[in-house]
Image (tube, rainbow, N blue to C red):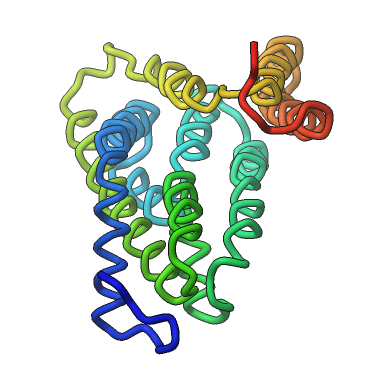
Amino acid sequence: MTVELNRAPTARDWTHEALVGARDTAPILPGVLPFGMIYGAAAVAAGLSPTLAQGMSVALFAGASQVAAVDLLVRDAGWLTILVAILVINSRFVMYGAALAPSLPRLSGPRGILASYILTDQSFAVTLARSRQDPDPERRLSYFLGSSVTLWCTWQLGTLGGILVGAVIPPSWQLEFSIPLMFLALLFPVLRDRPSWLAAAVAGMVVIAAKGLPHNLGLIVGVIAGIATGLLAERRFGTGEDAS
């Protein structure tokens, strides 16, 4: 659909762009749904009630930090450690928001809160790509909302499915093993260049070296070390694909 650039977007334009955002996000959903199911099952296996497990998905809506929180709960980490881990892992969304802000209309009040809440890695990626094709900020916002809401619904359904499955699986099966596997599944697709490989390597080595720290603080120290390494490596090598 072609929209004239000299007129404001109509309700039809908004609806169209939201549906396009949902459509462009659809190929990602087969990976999001099982991710949510594994989180839901692991949360129940870790001792969370179904209500609390689902409530965490609604309140946080951040898969990686939710999985990390469950992993720390299994390891008997303190609530302060869990909170700091969630904040550190979710800090990337500050950079996402800063990158998207120039492409979207000025957001404040309820719209700004909603956009911040439903921002994900996937919706950030597809919206950033779309912003290069559509010059209108309002249509870009509609596209972003269509993508993000689709991901939100899929994540909630995946969590619910995992809770239902986890509730009927015997505790002796120890579903906690799925948490490290989930992190590996998240890790390898993003290792595309030298800075990301260095960041992952340093983070992993620091976590192992700091394993003896109290309250499982080694995870937080490793994450911070990985982020710092990635930022320094980007300044040194850039963000292009590794030529090796």
Residue under the point 73% across and 17% down: 202
Disc tally is 0
Tell me what residue is drawn at x 56 percent, y 66 percent.
103
Quarter of the image for residue 168 reads top left
- Given residues 100 and 84, the one toward you in this image is 100
Pick whichever, 92 or 15, lies toward us.
15
Quadrant housing the N terminus: bottom left
User: Quick one: 132 or 128, which is closer to the camera?
Assistant: 132
Q: Would residue 208 be found to the left or right of residue 34 on screen?
A: right
Q: Is residue 47 left or right of residue 232?
A: left
Camera sees residue 224: no
Which residue is at the far bottom?
Answer: 7
Q: With respect to residue 17, does 32 lie above or below? A: above
Q: Judge left or right: residue 57 versus residue 208.
A: left
Residue 121 visible (yes or no): yes
Q: Position of residue 93 (x, y in %)?
A: 59, 51
Q: Nearer the viewer, residue 42 or 97?
A: 97
Could you tell me residue 131's position as x and y percent?
49, 60
Residue occupying image coordinates x 44% and y 40%: 63
- Residue 20 drawn at (x, y percent): 28, 60
User: Can you say whether 10 is above or below 79 in the image?
Assistant: below
In percent of width and height, residue 174 lies at: 33, 15
Determine which quarter of the picture holds residue 244.
top right
